[in-house]
């Protein structure tokens, strides 16, 4: 009936205010009764007995605006005189804030720890591995007559960003000791002195990081008989350039060479030949403290030879990371390779297949 042309928003608001300002229920009933007119049906359709309608009269709805009756449809009449009930009725299973605070307090009663290396990008906290949601919910129900459902309990658990997944990397002993001191001591000056001793005074800009990936078998077979056979080991020395994000992988298998200090030094020297330009004056390497591969006289002698062979080099810095803080970009590259291994479309039978797997991640591979 195009009621919006006769009744704009301001007029409907005025009618709504007048109607609810009447106060009593009887007055509002009389107001509505005055605006509804009952009439006989104008058209009667002859229908089959099964589909015959029982309505015998027609109701006409209208409003009085400036002394003139304006006819409107039933929907417009009801929407103008009735309050909007949407969103005002609470759900039957809604829990009180006191009950939800009880759930949060129960979750916080379990000791949780953060990831050691990804605290800046991951705000989750991790509970002990022997726990799970079923155990925690059963402990929550003990001693409580009125408790929430497990669905709501698990929803609140995830809202608090809790998980049971173990961190991939071990924490540092010095950092764990400092955290324990912070929790139990009241001598802040003593803590400050320990912190100053543990933290470096300044950080030098990084250039290259290197690490040898853990040993991996050459083949991936589904046959159980292969598990009991002696399999071929493959090695991968990864050098990650922090300036460009480039990952270079030097790969070989145990028939070619071992994985001692001479092999590591040879790969590093070859990396110098291919990567260093005359503009580079200083190079910084970050590595772990593995004596058989990095922290030894063979690698140091190789660096001395590089200084002699490349006159443009002024200094080579070899930094050994503190145990517990050895997570580097190379470890991220290795993790990406492990994930890719689960999705490969070919089987690995030959060392070249293993090298191709690493190339699938657009990493550089030197065989």
Image (cartoon, rainbow, N blue to C red):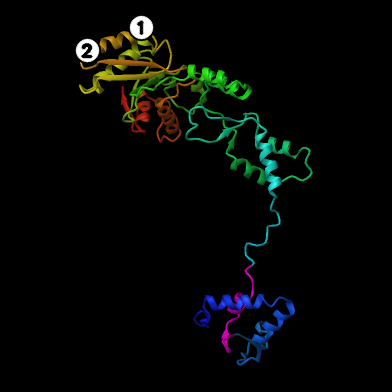
Is residue 79 part of the magenta span, yes or no? yes
* Residue 335 higher or lower than 313, as above or below: below
Q: Quadrant of residue 366?
A: top left
Q: Residue 297, percent across and down? A: 36, 6
153 or 197, which lies in front? 197
User: Looking at the image, is 38 positioned above or below residue 220?
Assistant: below
Please provide percent x and percent y for residue 252: 35, 19
Q: What residue is shown at x 21% (from left), y 23% (from top)?
A: 279
Residue 357 vs residue 306, the one in the foreground = 306
| Residue 328 horizontal side relative to residue 49, left or right | left
The mark nearer the N terminus, 2 or 1, is 1
Q: Nearer the viewer, residue 77 or 63?
A: 63
In the displayed structure, 46 sits above or below 214; it is: below
Q: Quadrant of the C terminus?
A: top left
Q: Which region of the structure is painted magenta?
A: 64-84
Q: Is residue 139 left or right of residue 191?
A: right
Give the image quarter of residue 138: top right
Assign a secondary structure to mark 2. Answer: helix
Given residues 197 and 162, the one toward you in this image is 197
Label 1 SS = helix
Q: Is residue 247 above or below residue 44?
A: above
Asked if residue 237 can be seen in this view, the reply is no
Crowding around mark 1 (Cα neighbors within 10 Å: few <14, some 14 to 19, many 20+) is: few
Relative placement, left or right, of 167 versus 92 is: left
- Disc 2 to disc 1, C-alpha distance: 18 Å
Q: Position of residue 34 (x, y in %)?
A: 67, 87
Pointer 2 local density, CA inside 10 Å: few below 14, some 14–19, many at least 20: few
Residues at discs 2 and 1 in contact (Cβ within 8 Å): no
Q: Which residue in the structure is indicated by mark 2?
A: 309
Q: Where does residue 101 sit, x and y in percent of width and height?
A: 68, 43
Residue under circle 1?
297
Residue 192: tell me if it is visible.
yes
């Amino acid at each position: 009936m195009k009621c919006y042309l006769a009744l704009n928003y301001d007029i409907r608001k005025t009618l709504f205010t007048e109607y609810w300002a009447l106060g009593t229920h009887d007055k509002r009933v009389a107001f509505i009764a005055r605006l509804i007119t009952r009439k006989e049906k104008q058209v009667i359709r002859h229908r089959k007995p099964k589909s015959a309608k029982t309505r015998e009269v027609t109701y006409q709805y209208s409003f009085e605006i400036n002394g003139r009756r304006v006819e409107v449809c039933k929907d417009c009449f009801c929407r103008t005189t009735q309050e909007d009930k949407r969103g005002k009725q609470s759900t039957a299973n809604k829990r009180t804030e006191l009950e939800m605070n009880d759930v949060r307090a129960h979750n916080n009663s379990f000791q949780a720890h953060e990831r050691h290396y990804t605290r800046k990008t991951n705000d989750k906290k991790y509970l002990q591995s022997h726990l799970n949601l079923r155990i925690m919910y059963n402990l929550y129900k003990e001693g409580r007559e009125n408790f929430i459902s497990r669905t709501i309990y698990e929803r609140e658990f995830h809202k608090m960003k809790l998980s049971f997944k173990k961190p991939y990397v071990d924490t540092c002993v010095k950092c764990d000791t400092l955290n324990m001191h912070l929790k139990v001591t009241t001598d802040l000056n003593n803590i400050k002195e320990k912190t100053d001793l543990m933290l470096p005074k300044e950080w030098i800009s990084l250039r290259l990081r290197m690490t040898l990936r853990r040993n991996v078998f050459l083949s991936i077979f589904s046959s159980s008989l292969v598990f009991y056979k002696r399999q071929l080991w493959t090695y991968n020395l990864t050098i990650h350039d922090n300036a460009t994000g480039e990952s270079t992988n030097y790969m070989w298998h145990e028939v070619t060479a071992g994985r001692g200090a001479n092999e590591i030094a040879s790969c590093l020297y070859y990396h110098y030949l291919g990567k260093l330009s005359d503009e580079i004056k200083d190079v910084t390497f970050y590595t772990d403290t593995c004596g058989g591969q990095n922290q030894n006289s063979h690698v140091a002698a190789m660096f001395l030879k590089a200084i002699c062979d490349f006159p443009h080099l002024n200094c080579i810095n070899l930094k050994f990371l503190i145990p517990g803080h050895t997570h580097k970009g190379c470890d991220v590259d290795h993790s990406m390779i492990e994930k890719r291994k689960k999705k490969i479309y070919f089987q690995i039978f030959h060392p070249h297949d293993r090298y191709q797997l690493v190339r699938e991640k657009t990493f550089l591979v030197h065989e």
